Structure formats: structure tokens, C-alpha cells
Image (cartoon, helix red, strand yellow):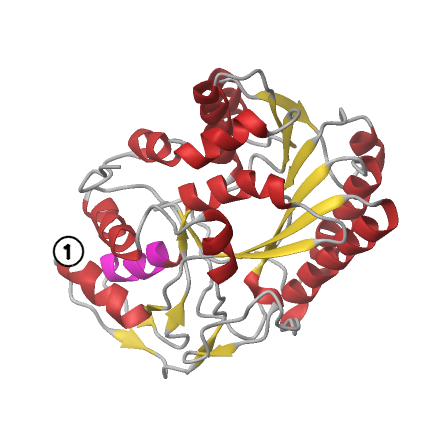
Amino acid sequence: MLFPESIKDVEQLEKLLCIPNPALVDMMRRLKGDIMILGVAGKMGVTMAMLAVNAIREAGVAKRVIGVARFSNPAEREKLEHHGVETVTCDLLDREQVSRLEKVDNVIFMAGRKFGTDGSEELTWAMNILAPEYVCEHFKASSIVAFSTGCVYPLEHITSCGSTEETIPAPVGEYSQSCLGRERIFQYYSKKNGTKVLLFRLNYSIDLRYGVLHDIASNIAAGEPVNNTVGFFNCIWQGDANSNALRALEFCESPCAILNVTGPETASVEHAATIMGRIMNKPVSFKGVPGETGYLNNSGKMCKLLGYPVVSLTQMIEWQAQWFVNGGISIGKPTHFEVNNGKF
């Protein structure tokens, strides 16, 4: 696939994010039943739903994509419906509302809470524990891909090759602990009811409007030093992450399967910042004492099952820098990738 040198606006970005690869199209021909995306109005859900619709159309099959959320932003709902996604309003923290959702064969669970945890821990635990319980009770006969995070793992040394799916979780801080709690709920119901589940441990998705690279480039654009306290990270293009989440429906198991989802490289903050500064024609400086640990995950299993990401790290870095040169927007949700004490 030929990629543009730069992405000039949101319309072009979302169009690129929603192009299905041949493997996803083939999967849609095999997959039985409709797809429901819970938490569809979040950072990744809108483009995932539109990607699914595009793949279904290209596959030439009859299959519905249903997006469920509270839809506090009506524009996102309108965009989804215009693209052919059916939408349903539901508060996933309301058991009665969840019980009224249509039962479908395939569910992507994307709902969760991270930012603002510090000081409102009880809401984070409720969203990350109670909502999964209600969903598991209702969709016990479905295949469920449940989004999780690489933050359930311990911090890894930069020479370690990252945590694998066999690494024993050791979450730091209440957000990460609640994410492990979410996983345990899915694991419990997967065993209890025989529900086929895959825990989708993602870090970090790149969209240009947010993400680790966006945070680094934002500092450069503002003439501020880049925080290099956590000097290395993993990331994956959001289009690749969304495609892999949909394809993961074929790998759900009981007991739960686990899949790390990220890019194959261990990326350097200094390296990425230096390249982006050059493209943006901006000076680059750093702050903090570089550490030798971080949330680093090994995506070898993902690459074996689903193939290597289509978009490379170098391409993401170049696109991110050009996004700022072109005046691209931000959704104002920093990743806090430089945080390694669990306080988000």
C-alpha cells in the first residue's frame, strides 16, 4: 500500500485509518454473526466501527456493526450512522440498560477509565470492574475481545525484549490495578460460563490527534523540553490496532486468551524527538533523568498470529511531525507515557 508523505487533515486521517487490509476482509467473510462495539465513542472506537463497515462491504457479506456508548458528543454518533453503523445509547454502569442490549455473536469491549483516576479512584474501579461484570453476565454466549493495557505488567528494562503474555502481572498504581481487576472479571466469567474471550493488552495507539508521538511533538511545537524520564516506549498505528482487535475475534478462547498488541520496536524518545524536531524545524531539548525501565511489551505472538503492522514506526514519526507542521488538531488527551508510578 502506498502511503501519503503527510496527512493534512482529520478527513484524510480517518479515511486512512478506515482502509481495511486483505486479511481483515477475508476474516469478515468467515466470521459468523454481527459485531457490537461497546464504548464506541472513545478515542479508537469510531474509526474501528467505520473500518469494520468498510471491511464488511469489501467482503460482500451481510453483517451489522452496532456501536454502543453514552454518546455525549452527538457529532460522533452522526458520523457513525452516516457511515452505516447502527448506534445504541447505553450507560454500561447501569445493569438494567446493559440487560436490554441486543445479544450478538461478536463483542468488542472498549469501555474503561484511565485519565483522572488520581483523586477519583472509586469511579475508575467502578468503570473498570462493574461494567465488565454486567457485560459478561449479558453476553455469556458471545465471543468478546476485551481491551486491556500493557500497564498490568511490571516495568521492564530496555534490554529485556519486553513483557510477554506469560509474564506475571504486577500493576503499579490504582489505574493499573483496576485494569488487572477488569481482566480477572473476564477470566472468571470465561471459566464460569464458557464465554470465549481474548484480553487485548494494548500500548500505545497512534492516531496523530493523540498518542505518545503526539505528546512528544506537542512539546517540541510549544518550545518546551520533552520529558525523557521514561526514555523508551512501544506504539502501534491505530489502524493496525483496530484491525487486529477485529481479527482477534477469531482467537477468543475459554479460558481467556491473552494478546499483547503493539509495535515490534522498542522506540526511543530522544530518537523520535530528534527526527520530529528536524522535520518541524524546531529546536529540541529534554528534561528529566533518563531511566532504564518502562512499559515495554513483546508483540511476537501478535506478529505470528496477525502479521507485522502495516505502518512502520518511521512512518508514524514522520506523519506526526508533519501533522503539527500542517496545523493538525489535538483531542487534548495526553498519554502520560512519562509516568511510571501509576498515577494518571
User: Where is 228 relative to 316, above or below?
Assistant: below
Q: How many marks overall?
A: 1
How far across and down, in percent of the image, does residue 338 sit?
Answer: 44, 70
Q: Residue at x 61, y 40 (%)?
A: 250
* Helix, strand or loop status at disc 1: helix
Q: What's under tag 1, amino acid-wise?
A: Ile
Q: Is residue 229 left or right of residue 285?
A: right
Q: Is residue 3 left or right of residue 132?
A: left
How far across and down, in percent of the image, does residue 227 sit?
Answer: 35, 72
Question: Is 321 in front, or is 53?
Answer: 53
Query: What kind of secondary structure does the magenta stretch mostly adopt?
Result: helix
Q: Is residue 64 left or right of residue 52?
A: right
Residue position for label 1: 279
User: Where is 124 relative to 64, above or below?
Assistant: below
Q: Is residue 120 visible?
A: no
User: Where is 343 relative to 182, above or below?
Assistant: below
Q: Residue at x 37, y 68 (%)?
A: 266
Question: Is 38 in front, or is 186?
Answer: 186
Looking at the figure, which quarter contains the C terminus?
bottom right
Q: Residue at x 26, y 59 (%)?
A: 222
Start and end of the magenta stretch? 213-222
Question: Is 33 in front, or is 221?
Answer: 33
How far across and down, in percent of the image, does residue 179 sit?
Answer: 67, 59
Question: Is 225 in front, or is 201?
Answer: 201
Looking at the figure, which quarter contains the N terminus?
top left
How far across and down, in percent of the image, does residue 236 sit?
Answer: 41, 53
Question: Does 18 appear in magenta?
Answer: no
Question: Does 221 appear in magenta?
Answer: yes
Q: Residue at x 32, y 77 (%)?
A: 287
Q: Quadrant of residue 341?
A: bottom right
* Mark 1 crowdedness (10 Å alpha carbons): few <14, some 14-19, many ≥20: some
Q: Is residue 320 visible?
A: yes
